[in-house]
Amino acid sequence: MAIPSKSKKPPRFYFWRKTLSLSDLNVPRRSKIAIDALRTLSLIPSFLGFLYNSRQALHVPLRDAGGALILQSSQVDYVVASIWCALAGYWNWVLTTSMMRRWIFHYEMSSAIVRLITFIVITWSISAYVNSHNGPDQPIRTWMVNCFIILITDVIRLSIVSDPKYHGKSAHVTDPNLFLKLTVMKVLIYPLSVATCLSVFAVLRQIDQLQYTTSQLMAGPPLLNTGVSLPPTATTTSVLILIISSWSSTSFERRNMLRKSALRLLSSHGTSVTVNYRFVIGQPPSATDQLFAKPQVMKESETFRDIIIVQSSDIELDKSRKVFEALRWAKSVEHDYIVKSDDNVFARWDIILKEISVMKKTPYYWRGLTYRNIPIKILPNAKSLQIDYALPNLPAYTHSMLYLFSKDMLDLIVSPPTSPTRRFIKDDGENIAIWLFGFSIQPIHDRRIQDGENVCEDDMIGKRMDSISDMSKMYFNIVNERPQCTNFDTSACAICYSCKDKKIGWSTLNLACDKTKGITLKEMSGFDQIAGRNYIHDYTS
């Protein structure tokens, strides 16, 4: 009995071999090499676009280091553009392969190659025109237009040329419309859907970030509790305390704890000093914070009347910009001294205010835990500093956790007589030193401000707290007239303090300390002094 013959199955990856290759056609070897080389040339515009966008995406952090001066294409823009470059290259290869199949079927090999060269020149010209018309700062629009031009061309090609005879042997084509259906789905719809979905998700995420984290889009005066009480007489010294906080739940708890502990020490100052303090937060960092945290912040503001919202991003990387906007507001309310602190710092406000009340007013006064002649390469944000400012060393700066300066410093920081351009790095203490670079203003070193986790000295006026309960513990020690470091870890000696009977010494960190100049490195290889003008009057006169 005769065994019925089974239908021959198409080879593996049959569709993709037909779509992307000419291997099944009877093309002479010499001509095949030339045709493959010419088809590869059709990928050059997409390949160059992919390289350009990838390089620009890697360059964005360097371009915007220190804060973007103007809004330009972001990393997300260039990454999305690279996706559309890849899609354009894929579609161009498919289109070139399909057209070459038709030309080989209808014309002599030489004529088919001439048509292929002409087609490649046309695609190059269209791509060059689209790129030059949109400009270098519109990468997504440029390559989406290129893709849709190729898409329209491919749709026209499919509607006119869909005969299976152009696909070589017809034994595997059981349905006359097989290749038309597969091409539309696998070559056009699926890749287009993937690219569109990735683009939509990326762009929507970027819009959300731009709306809530881009300070260049934020303008206007500070909001909420901007009114302050002025000193009753000209002889009274006025002090404004700016405590940098945020929208996070942890910061909310810190603010409440500071009101119950350190800020109560403000009441012990005499009548010769008038004090105002404000917690400074930026704009809501996300839609979630705006929806859920804003009512809590508004209620807190109405209850305590001690919060201002500045026109700046609230994320950690934009802390310097938030401080700058707070200083801009501070300049408008006219206080003799400004003290900047963080919401995780316990400050001895009673001691600070007492010292201010007996202090003679000094022009361009600046005090804090001072670092001097520190090479930028040892800092975590050294790359951005080196690119923006080309400084071998950082100018002398104070630690950002707590510092104090007089009101005439605000004129140089907020509205300097030289360049009004402001670049921003993460740490505001270093940033202020860079803004004041060239004015020859030197900070006064105060070792009583410490940032170490396991350091505590009884004469300290500022200590960063690891936990909220530590603030309550230190306040309890102070009001009960006990040494403030009672029950605190004091195993390490604070920088610039004596390390006698201490397990861990700061001298092992290769640091040296001068009582007046501040902290520096023991060994320095060059750059003893930063060049600059000798007198501030050279700029202000």
Image: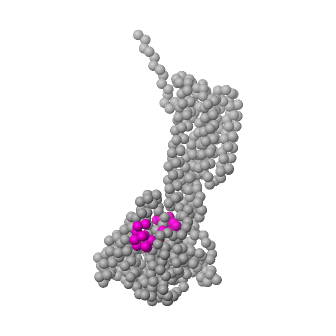
In this view, the residue farthest toward the front is 302
Q: Is residue 264 left or right of residue 356?
A: left
Q: Is 499 or 324 nearer to us in this picture?
A: 324
Is residue 366 in the magenta section?
Answer: no
Residue 76 visible to the viewer:
yes
Q: Is 413 or 296 nearer to us in this picture?
A: 296
Percent x, y of residue 68? 57, 63
Residue pictured at 55% horizontal, 67% vertical = 220
Work out which quarter of the rendered image holds the C terminus and state it: bottom right
Q: Is residue 270 left or right of residue 24?
A: left
Please provide the residue range marked out in magenta. Answer: 298-322
Residue pictured at 50% horizontal, 57% vertical = 209
Percent x, y of residue 74? 56, 56
Residue pictured at 53% horizontal, 80% vertical = 334
Q: Quadrant of residue 401?
A: bottom left
Residue pictured at 62% horizontal, 80% vertical = 539
